[in-house]
């Protein structure tokens, strides 16, 4: 965006030109390395959790969605094939239970 001025009726008026402003479509993107999520401002989450359509997802240092087991601090999380964090369910053929916070409940 840039600002320019016009002289009309004896005064200057500021005008904004948005023609060079990038427009991004928020949503899931995929390339040969995997899936990532682009925010409306063009950024994407890296080393972070993001809640998307009611489910939590974790993204690695390069911004790609993770799947499988993920450890953060002392807690283990299970990220399904869709990337969504497992919640209140059994995973891996009913071997492991994941609680309502997404944590693996160790016996």
Image: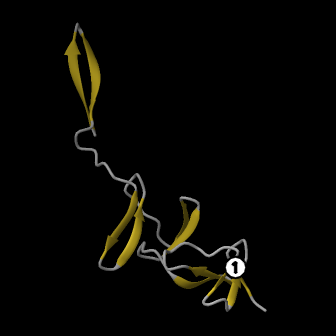
In x, y percent, where is residue 15? Answer: 27, 26
Q: Which is more toward the observer, 76 or 47? A: 76
In x, y percent, where is residue 44? Answer: 42, 63
Q: Residue at x 26, y 17 (%)?
A: 12
**Rendered position, 64 above or below 106:** above
Residue found farthest to the top = 9
Look at mark 1 in the image and give the residue it sits on.
103
| Residue 3, picture quadrant | top left
Image quarter (top left, top right, bottom left or bottom right) of the C terminus: bottom right
Position of 34 with respect to 105 (left or right) is left
| Residue 35, picture quadrant | bottom left
Residue found farthest to the front = 93
Q: Which is more toward the observer, 106 or 6? A: 106
Q: Which is more toward the observer, 61 or 27? A: 27
Decide: few, some or many residues near mark 1? Use Cα within 10 Å; few <14, some 14-19, many ≥20: some
Position of 81 with respect to 72 (left or right) is left
Q: Residue at x 40, y 59 (%)?
A: 27
Image quarter (top left, top right, bottom left or bottom right) of the N terminus: top left
Position of 106 with respect to 58 (left or right) is right
| Number of numbered labels in the structure image | 1
In x, y percent, where is residue 58? Answer: 53, 73
Q: Residue at x 45, y 76 (%)?
A: 61
Q: Residue at x 23, y 43 (%)?
A: 20
**In terms of secondary structure, where does tag 1 sit?**
loop
């Amino acid at each position: 965006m840039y600002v320019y001025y016009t002289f009309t009726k004896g005064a200057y008026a500021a005008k904004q030109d948005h023609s060079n402003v990038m427009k991004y479509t928020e949503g899931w993107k995929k390339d040969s390395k995997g899936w990532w999520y682009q925010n409306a401002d063009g950024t994407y989450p890296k080393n972070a959790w993001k809640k998307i359509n009611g489910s939590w997802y974790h993204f690695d240092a390069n911004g790609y969605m993770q799947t499988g087991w993920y450890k953060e601090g002392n807690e283990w999380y299970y990220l399904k094939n869709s990337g969504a964090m497992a919640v209140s369910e059994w995973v891996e053929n009913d071997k492991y239970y994941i609680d309502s916070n997404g944590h693996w409940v160790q016996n």
